[in-house]
Every structure is written in C-alpha cells, then in structure tokens.
Image (cartoon, rainbow, N blue to C red):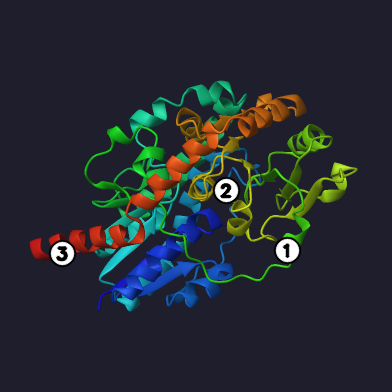
Amino acid sequence: MKRVVFFNVSAAGHVIPTFGLVAELIKRGQEVVYFEAPRFQDELEAFGASFRPYSAIRSYEGPFAGLPFHNELDLAPVLTWCTLEWLPALLEQVKKEKPDYIIHDSLSLWGKIVAQLLGIPAICVIATAALNAANTIEQDHYLSDSPGLDIESLTSLKYFNELEQQLREKYQLSPITFMDTFTNPQGLNICYLPRELQPGVEGFDDTFFFVGPCDPIRSTSDHDFSFDALTRDPLIFISFGSIHDPGVEVYQSCLEAFKDQQVQVLLLLSPSMERDVLGNIPGNFIIRNTGSVPQLEVLERTDLFIMHGACGAARESAWRSVPMIAIPQTFEQDMISRRIESLGAGLRLPQSDVSSKSLRETATKILSESTYRDQSSRLGEACRNAGGAKLAVDKIFSYLESHFTSN
C-alpha cells in the first residue's frame, strides 16, 4: 500500500471532480490523506480518505491590503499569499505523513512547492480546462468582451510580483511566473475533460491525459427539493455555480425572458444574490439557493441548461445530453463556452450581450432544433468513453512505477 497526500483548493468545482479518483485510488489499495477545507470533510471521509484541514490564514497586511477581488487574474496573488501562509506548517505535516507521492490541483501552488522541497514525486490534476501558452493567446478576444480587465490585471500583477519575490527568496525557489500559479504542471497531468471538450488539445504533449469525468459518483446529500414541483415541459434549468455571481441584471433578464413562455424554469441563486432584490417572481419559476437541489437528478429532467460555462457544469450537462446556453464569467469559462458552441452542443452569450430578448431568442432556437441535444449527447458519449477514474489511476501507477524504477 502506498500513501498519497492530496492538496486541493477550497472550491466545489475543484473538489467534487476528485471524488471518483479518490474512491478508485482507495479501491486499488492506496491510502489517501486529503488536505481541504472542513466543509468537504464528511464527503471525503465517506469515500475512505483521511481528512486534514488547512490552517486559518491571517488577512494580508501589505501595501495592497483591502483591494477588491476584481476577476480571475486576482487568483495569482491570492494563491501565492496562501502558499506563503501555509507552507511552513504543510512542510512539517507532510514530513510526518511520509507520503510516497503527492497529487495536487493545478491551482495548488503550495502542493507543487511542497513536493519540490521535500523531493516527493507529484501529479497535477486539472479541474478546469488545461492551459498553455497557445490556447491562452488564442483567447485574446476575451479582453474585448471584458472592459477594464486589462487595467485591473496590472494591479494583480504588481501584487503577485511582490508576493512571488517573498516566496522565492524565503525558500530559494526558481522564479514563478504569473501563469505558473494557474497551471503548476508536473511530469504527469490529468485533466477531467475528454479530449473533445479541451480547447487546443493538440497543443499538449504526452505528459497530459484527458480522462474525462472522474466524478459520476458522490455520497448522498440531503435535499428538501420535491420533483413533484416540476410540472411543465420543457424545463429550463439556470445555475451559475457556487462562486460566481453574474449580477442582478442577468437574473432579472432571465425572469423577463421566460415569464410569459410555455416553459418551467428552475433558477438557482448564487450565494451573494438575495431573492428579495428580484421583485415579483413569475408563476412558472421556482427559485432556489445554490446547493439546495440535487443538480445531477435535475439535469436528467432538463431540456435546456443556462449556466456559466464551467467545466463541471459542461461535463454534467453533456453526460445527460442537455444542450446549453453558456454565459461565461471568467477567462476559462469563456474557453469552454466557445468550445461548447463550436461542437454544436449549445450557444455562448457574452455577459455584455445578455438581455431578455437575447435569452429568449437563444433558448427558442436551441429548444426548437434537435441538433443541439444530439451534439450534447455525442459530447456525453465522449465523456463516458474517455477513461475516467480507472484510466487516471492506471496512468498514475504507470508514472510512479517509472519514477521509482529510475530512482
């Protein structure tokens, strides 16, 4: 039996995709020690992993303290700050755990550095689209759809450079680039997308494997949602995930777009959105908070999924042959949204173009043309045939055997 320490970031879209992988590793004789936020403890332990909580982080007190979180580019300094805060304790904890190898999320800069400093072989897992120089440059149109993003990024870069210098000098590391904080590649990199859904897949070398979803299983969660409330066809399901908030205007556009239509709409509010600010709710709408419905079961009954273009939502929708309208909130979601559109499994609406009219017309087009569901179904087949958790663990074992043999 080998022991693996697993590092992840504290976001459902990154943790949930690992559940199937954790279960398969344990099934095949591995001991999994998982570092994560306490809210994921019960589910991780249900799969047989040993849970370790990250320590609390003090507030940053440097010259950029108090600046608002503008966009995804601010993740680079945030992740670097977390790495500075966590590394001393993590290095000591991992020494005590004595793992044979480490698995870390592509955003887990601390995971990569722990492995590097302790000389432990490591594997990177990617819950988003895999990024490289080529497919990043190809998305330069995202800047034109996001006014102010290029200006805001200058603050992120300045903040990052200061923290990166502290981290590099404290631990005698090689320079860490802005892009490194989003990718952290290793000798083996496993992405939870099938090749068909990965943008620019031809630009990745043979250290990258696109195994598709590893998370069709999940421990049972209690929900008070009654499916008896779903009384009309077609059903439009709207959810922008548990982190991103598209803003009250987008939600109000959804209400206006479908209030007089022969559809039923199940709309999930982001955690920062209050129902009261939406005003009167049309009778054909069911409004719920994010996380308060069994999303996978709802998708089985859904005719159209309006979402943010995140990888998890795209995988889950395609798995159930549901066509999509993607309204991206981040750079990576924009990549996936464009890929969904190019594959014919749905259509992309930039947030700047979202109105009740554009939503209604786009939804009508998708619901009236069966090709969108057909293409989503084909993408679902690609997800099912990509190999999943079994292939991922096969690649991990092969990589480790090669590593330990050569050493």
Which comes before the other along the chain, label 1 or label 3? 1
Q: Would you say 400 lies left or right of 275 here?
A: left
SS at mark 2?
loop
Q: Is residue 11 left or right of residue 173?
A: right
Residue positioned 69% across, 67% down in the render: 223
Residue 32: image x %, image y %?
37, 73
Label annotation for residue 225: 1
Residue 390's disc number:
none
- Quick one: label 2 or label 1, which is nearer the N terminus? 2
Disc 3 marks which amino acid?
Answer: Glu
Q: Which residue is mark 2?
A: 62
Decide if residue 202 is in sight here: yes
Q: Which numbered mark, 1 or 3, is in the foreground of this view?
A: 1
- Indicate the position of residue 100 as horizontal and vertical percent values: 25, 71
Task: Give amino acid for label 1.
Answer: Phe
Confirm or deny contact between disc 1 and disc 3 (CB under 8 A).
no
Residue 224 image position (x, y, % from top left): 73, 67
- Category of crowding for the residue at label 3, using alpha-carbon neighbours closer than 10 angstroms: few (below 14), some (14–19), many (at least 20): few
